[in-house]
């Protein structure tokens, strides 16, 4: 009976040599080649493992010194075992499971596509294909999205600062959030958002900051609107805020207040 073996090794310590020893040892014990899995992170490393196995078996067939090496390191006990291992590899080159972790999981996903809910003919994007897909999606959003939604989205991404590189900003957002989205469940995005309540100290600090910022607002209409919002917050007149407040217009994604365009600097506040 073959026991499981765990080997911990850092870079440059001879992992390929040790893995090829283990592979050849399993072959010598009659384990079918297709029942042995050897995976690594890169195609280059996988190719090195495969080549090392073939080279060492072939060398041991041709000369005794290499045969004695396999006896010492791979547990080959006889020339008959060596020949059986060599023939097993040669006749099963097409079914050797030596590759990358990515290819291993992709193969399983292909074979179990129905169980995983994948559509027939699915494939993994290459880097250029992924870049094109992201760009096409962004183009569709910009072309067919509602102006109010787009304006609010861009303002939120740029924290209220107007920029001309809209596409680039969206590309960065996709890259930064893609892994989070992939690790999240569908319910996480479709569920209701429950905001945490602010402490009275935090609210007071925020209102003071807003009050200081209003002093730099040149437009009298917006300056007065900010001060009215601050007063309504302090008196907790939220009904008035919802119906008339400048902040409610900004939160609602509206671009005008009192028939005037809301400056981007105010949206950032």
Image (cartoon, rainbow, N blue to C red):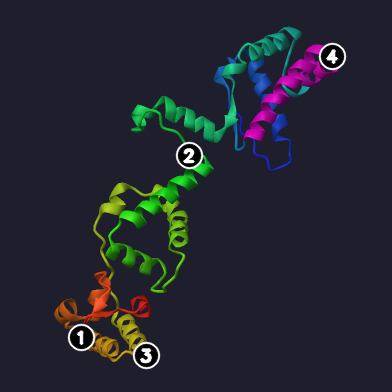
- In 3D space, how far apart are the residues under numbered discs 3 and 4 (Cα atoms)? 88 Å
Q: Is residue 214 shown above or below 145?
A: below
Residue 181 is left or right of residue 259, and the answer is right
The residue that mark 3 highlights is: 212
- In 3D space, how far apart are the residues under numbered discs 3 and 2 (Cα atoms)? 50 Å
The residue that mark 4 highlights is: 64
Label 2 close to label 1 by CB (< 8 Å)? no
How many numbered badges does the structure rendering display?
4
The main secondary structure of the magenta stretch is helix
Label 3 close to label 1 by CB (< 8 Å)? no
Place of residue 74 in the rendered image (x, y in percent of width and height, measured from the top left) = 72, 22
Tag nearer the camera, 4 or 2: 2
Mark 2: give few (<14), some (14-19) or many (20+) Cα within 10 Å. Answer: few
- In 3D space, how far apart are the residues under numbered discs 3 and 1 (Cα atoms)? 16 Å
Between 22 and 83, the residue placed more toward the observer is 83
Disc number placed over residue 125 in the picture, else none: 2
Q: In what element is the residue under mark 2? A: loop
Residue 212 is left or right of residue 128, and the answer is left
Farthest residue to the top: give it: 80
Question: What span is colored magenta in the figure?
Answer: 43-71
Q: In what element is the residue under mark 4? A: helix
Tag nearer the camera, 1 or 4: 1
Place of residue 175 in the rendered image (x, y in percent of width and height, measured from the top left) = 47, 54
Q: Is residue 245 shown above or below 27?
A: below
Mark 4: give few (<14), some (14-19) or many (20+) Cα within 10 Å. Answer: few
Q: Is residue 19 visible?
A: no
The residue that mark 1 highlights is: 232
Q: Is residue 248 shown above or below 154?
A: below
Name the N-terminal-most of marks 1 and 4. 4
Farthest residue to the front: give it: 143
């Amino acid at each position: 009976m073959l026991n499981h073996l765990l080997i911990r090794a850092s870079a440059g310590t001879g992992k390929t040599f040790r893995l090829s020893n283990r592979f050849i040892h399993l072959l010598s014990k009659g384990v079918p080649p297709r029942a042995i899995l050897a995976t690594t992170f890169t195609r280059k490393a996988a190719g090195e493992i495969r080549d090392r196995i073939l080279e060492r078996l072939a060398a041991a067939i041709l000369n005794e010194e290499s045969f004695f090496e396999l006896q010492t390191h791979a547990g080959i006990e006889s020339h008959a075992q060596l020949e059986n291992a060599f023939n097993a590899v040669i006749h099963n080159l097409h079914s050797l499971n030596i590759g990358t972790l990515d290819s291993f999981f992709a193969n399983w996903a292909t074979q179990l596509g129905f169980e995983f809910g994948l559509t027939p003919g699915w494939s993994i994007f290459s880097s250029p294909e992924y870049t094109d897909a992201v760009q096409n999606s962004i183009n569709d959003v910009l072309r067919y999205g509602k102006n109010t939604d787009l304006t609010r989205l861009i303002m939120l991404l740029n924290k209220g600062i107007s920029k001309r590189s809209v596409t680039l900003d969206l590309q960065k957002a996709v890259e930064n959030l893609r892994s989070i989205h992939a690790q999240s469940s569908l319910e996480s995005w479709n569920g209701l958002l429950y905001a945490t309540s602010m402490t009275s100290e935090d609210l007071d600090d925020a209102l003071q900051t807003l009050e200081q910022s209003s002093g730099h607002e040149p437009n009298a209409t917006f300056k007065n609107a900010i001060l009215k919002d601050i007063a309504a917050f302090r008196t907790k007149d939220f009904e008035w805020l919802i119906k008339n407040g400048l902040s409610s217009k900004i939160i609602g994604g509206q671009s005008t207040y009192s028939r005037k365009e809301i400056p981007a600097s105010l949206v950032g506040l």
